Image (spheres, rainbow, N blue to C red):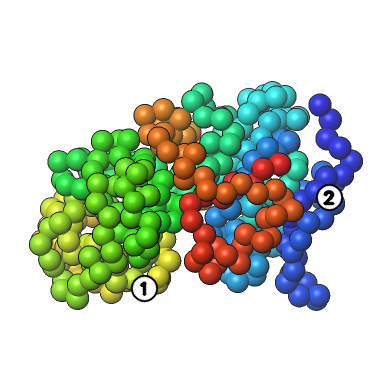
Amino acid sequence: MTTPASFRAFRIHNDDRGYRSGIESLSLDDLAPGEVVIRTEYSSVNYKDALAGTGEGKILRRFPLVGGIDVAGRVVESRDLRFREGDAVLVTGCGLSETRDGGYCEYARLEAEWTVPLPAGLDLREAMTLGTAGFTAALALHRMLENGQSPDHGPLAVTGASGGVGMLAIDIFTRAGFEVHAISGKADQAGFLRSIGAREVLGRDALSTKRAMESARFGGGLDNVGGTMLASLLAQTAPYGNVATAGLAASAELQTTVMPFIIRGVSLLGVASAGTARPVRERIWERLASDWKPAHLDRIRTREVTLDELPSVFPTMLAGGSFGRTVVRF
C-alpha cells in the first residue's frame, strides 16, 4: 500500500494571521517525522482537543500542527521491524497535537516507541471510544491497585461522572469488581449512569463539606473536577484508601489539610496519561481489551462524526453540552 500524494487533515495555525484551524490538504512531508505511517480509521474528541482546535487553551507547543491526541488505524509502511503493513495500531497522548502532528488526519506518521499494537479483544472503533479518556480511567485504577486498593475498602466515588472519563471509569471499575458511586451535577442522567454500572448516583452537594474530616463514606475514587470536590472526597475517604486525580473541570486549586493523610493514611495519586511509560501503557491496553473492557462501549459512544463535521463538535463540548464519547470516523 502506498501513501497518496495528498490527503486531508484538521490543522491548527498560530502566526501573524492569528489563531485559526480547519481542513487542509497535506502531504506526508508536511507531517512530523516518525518510523510508522498509518492510514487512519478512527480518532476521538477530548476536552483537550476542543481547547486546541478553538484556541481556548494553550495546548500546542509548536505550530502548525494537526490536531487530535488520539489515533487508530492500519500500518501502511514502517521502518521499525516491530510493525508490518496491515497491522492495527493505536496511539493516545505521547505528544500528539502538542509537539507533533496528531490524529485528525487521513494518514498519520507516528513514532514507533509510542505506537501500540491493537490488542486482541478490541477493534479500532472500540479503541477510540476508549481513547485517552478510557486509558486515563484505567491508569487511575492501575495506580490505586498498585497502592493497595481493594473492594473491601468500600465503594469508589467517580466525580464528573457524566463526562467521558467518568462514564468509562464507572464501567471499568465495575468490571474490575468495585462498587461505584457516581457524582454528577446532571440529575437527568442518573438513569443512564446506573445503566452503565453505578450503584448509586449522587448530586454534587453529596460531597459538599468545609470540614477537614468527615465520616468515611468511600473507599477511594477518581476525581475529574478538582477544587472543593477533590478536597471533600479526601475528607470522606476510608483509612488507607486512594483518591486518584485526573482533571480540573471545576478548578485547578486544592485547599485541604493534612488530616486525611496523617490520620487515615489516605493517598492522593496523580494520573498523567500522556507520558505513561510504554510497558505500563501496553499492560493497561491489554486489560482494557480483556478483564477491564467496558461492557457498555456502544452506549458510551454517543456520537460519531466525520472529519468535516469535527469543528462543529468543539463549541458544544466547551460549553458543557456534550455527553458521552465522540468518535471521529475516517
Q: CA distance from mark 2 to mark 1?
A: 41 Å
* Left-right relation of 116 to 139: right
Where is residue 160 drawn, in percent x and y? 37, 60
Picture layout, residue 35 above or below residue 310: above
Q: Nearer the viewer, residue 278 or 230?
A: 230
Q: Nearer the viewer, residue 231 or 187?
A: 187
Q: Report the quarter where the C terminus lies.
A: top right
Q: Residue at x 70, y 30 (%)?
A: 75
Residue bearing the label numbered 1: 253
Where does the image place residue 213, in percent across and percent down from the top left? 13, 67
* Type of amino acid under label 2: Leu
Q: Residues within 10 Å of mark 2 (few under 14, many from 20)?
A: many
Quick one: 298 or 155, which is closer to the camera? 298
User: Under tag 1, what secondary structure?
Assistant: loop
Asked if residue 113 can be seen in this view, the reply is: no
Disc 2 designates what residue? 26
Residue 322: give x, y in percent of width and height: 52, 59
- How many numbered marks are there? 2
Residue 316 in the image, given as x and y percentages of width and height = 57, 65
Q: Which residue is depicted at the point 56% across and 41% down?
A: 128
- Element class at badge 2: strand
The answer to which image quadrant residue 77 occupies is top right
Task: Name the residue located 37 percent from the left edge and 60 percent from the top edge.
Answer: 188
Q: Give left or right: position of 218 versus 187.
A: left
Q: Residue furthest right?
A: 5
Q: Is residue 145 above or below residue 25?
A: above
